[in-house]
Image (cartoon, helix red, strand yellow):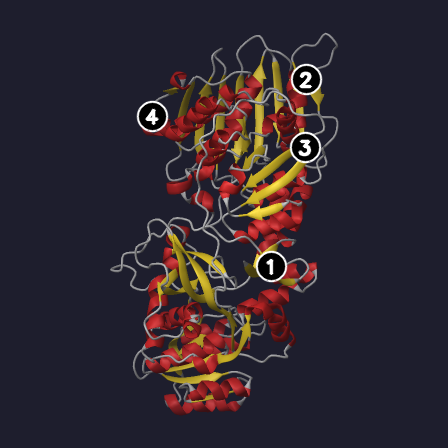
Amino acid sequence: MKQVVQNYKSGELAVLDVPVPGCKPGGVLVRTAYSLISTGTELMKVSEAGMSMLGKARSRPDQVAKVVQSVATNGVPATYRKVMGKLDSYTPLGYSLCGVVEQVGAGIDDVKVGDLVACAGNEHALHAELNWVPKNLYAPVPDGLAPRHAAFGTVGSIALQGVRQGEPQLGEVALVIGLGLIGQLVVQLLSAAGVRVVGADPDPARCELAERLGAEACGDPGSASVEAAVAELTGGHGVDQVYLAAGGGSNQPVELAARLCRDRGRVVDIGKCRLDLPWNAYYEKELDVRFSRSYGPGRYDPEYELEGRDYPIGYVRWTERRNLACFLDLMARGGVDVEPLVSHVAAFDDAVETYRSLKDGELKAVAVLFRYPERAEEAPEAPVVAVPAVNVKRTTARAAGTPVRVAFIGAGNYATSMLLPHLAGREGVELSTVVTTTALSAANAQRKFGFARATTDLDAVLGDGSVDAVFVVTRHSSHADLTRKALLAGKSVFVEKPLALTEDELAGVLAAVEESGNDRLQVGFNRRFAPLLQEAKQRFGARTGPANLRYLVNAGRLEHGSWYLRQGSEGSRFAGEGGHFIDTASWLLDADPVSVYAVATPGNEDLQVVLRYPDGSTATISYVTTGASGFPKETLDLVADGKVLRLDDFVRASVYFEKSTAGRKRWVSSRLPKARDKGQNAELAAFFRAVRTGGPMPVPLESLVATTAATLAVPAGLAGGAPVTLAGHR
């Protein structure tokens, strides 16, 4: 299928061939009929992409702050790779469309194949021939409403939510500053609600259009005409509400709002404009400044948008989806007319030229639609995940010089920044296939790392006899199932942590090993492969008595919306990454734990996990989210036999000796490494060496199982308040 994409680093726009997205449960696959260009938001993104790196940094100070924090946590080289990887990737455009349901995912019963729906979301309603859209981001189109008009549903919801925030009353007077696409819709919605409207915009054509659509008077915000119209309509008191629907860096809209608003009036910010509030003016009138959050309640809440959890109507009357349905109904009943806003309809294949014309000012438009070609041929069947029932005889050796052919399931941030850079161009490794549920991420990985092909069809990977090794780098909830299927298909498997989120999932993986005879499995516990830690362990040497290990993980807080916060589907944060630290402790102590005791700080995710080992050694992992962001993420101390091993965030290591025949009392890493090396490259080298030679996997299966079982025992320990014995897992 085709999709409009942009490279944020170079500014390049393209219509790219990408795989068809999979139809996941909880949503529908939609074939687009019309999609709407947001001439404000999207053109801003297009313009930013054309800036220099300094210009991009100035326009997004929030992202610059994240980069600075990443440098403190991960070092300059790793941060540079991560940032450049994100910048030099194709990103999608679009967030408002109308199309026909092509396939219905599990759990969906309110629409059927062939239904016309309006769709929203900058990750789901893209300028693409096919989109997967979750339940709360689509709404059925009422009978009689044209598809080209239904494509306005998302931007209409934005305008509608802004008007709701203003709480207009019959007979009031409102000022709309900025008469672009959103402003024109706000004018119509206010007029339909019995509010008299004055508009302000420097473009005379837009002022004339707003007056035709219901505004009492419109004019240039710098002229006296707007102020005169407000004075006449309000008897000199000022407007009841001001709606800021303008963009740009000028502070004029905010100042005009203060001047023309009545005492204790309401100012609603809908667009992305400068907001340097003149304190005296806003204070003296006691103005009520409100923000309108995009399409409405539910926006930026992953449980609502992605998992389909609705808000009770008695508590949240107007959600994203209800706003979308309401605006569609208003258009169907004639309360809002969007046809006069349509300045241009372009063929989807002409998307790049259309964006160029808009950016260069050749095409003056309020709203531009892409029209998609009617379906000329049957779309390929949506992939059905099926596991071939194969009994695999383990291969003990490979033909000399034969490359290991690799497939990746998933191509998210970790895969593209921490794994694939070590594999692209690696001798003896051939990147065969990348498979994702999101078409564009597969296409990006194919372009950047040289995969032979990209697809959304999992069967194409598992059933491909030429693929030797499969990397599972997806969301945590899918790791165990995908690992099980890949093992049954006879593949060597590298799965990022965690291996499993439940005991049943772990049992399923082990059942697949037993059924297939295929134990070629590695979990991404990379820290034991870190060169600095490897050398420190060697310097520490063998021990004769039990040891005490302390591991402080300053994990930090997660950003709102992070998928790590979806504990219902993806497990707790510690379940996701705690295996890293348990594995490192077990490797340093040369044993697997026999019991787990865990306590948590009330009200947050700070954990103390105490592991006990067969020889009496203990490891305490302090996993904290409330520490200072400037403090190193990982510090470790191992104490035994008069010796202390100290690791400081994979940047510096040292070993202290009580006595030494050579008179040496301390070893310190001889130099600071150029970057934190947490062992990914060495881990991958060990994995491919095992696959190529048929030798033992880098970490014994028994150890992978023990680490996973110990991680799973943490919530049981928290619930029971007593140590959990692990003997039953071994």
Are the residues flagged by discs 2 and 4 in contact, CB closer than 8 Å?
Answer: no
On residue 721, the disc is: 4
Is residue 451 in view? Answer: yes
Specify the amino acid type for callout 2: Arg
Q: Position of residue 256 (x, y in %)?
A: 50, 80
Density class for disc 4 (Cα within 10 Å; few <14, some 14-19, many ≥20) is few
Q: Is residue 311 left or right of residue 345?
A: left
Q: Amino acid at mark 4?
A: Gly
- Report the amino acid beneath label 1: Leu
User: Residue 398: image x %, image y %?
Assistant: 65, 25
Q: Which residue is mark 1?
A: 16
Mark closer to the chain start, 2 or 1:
1
| On-image quarter of the C terminus | top left
The quadrant of the image that shows the N terminus is: bottom right
Q: State how far apart marks 2 and 4 are (Cα).
A: 38 Å
The one nearer the camera, 143 or 578, is 143
Q: How packed is label 2: few (under 14 Cα within 10 Å), some, or many (20 or more)?
A: some
Q: What is the quadrant of residue 292 in the picture?
A: bottom left
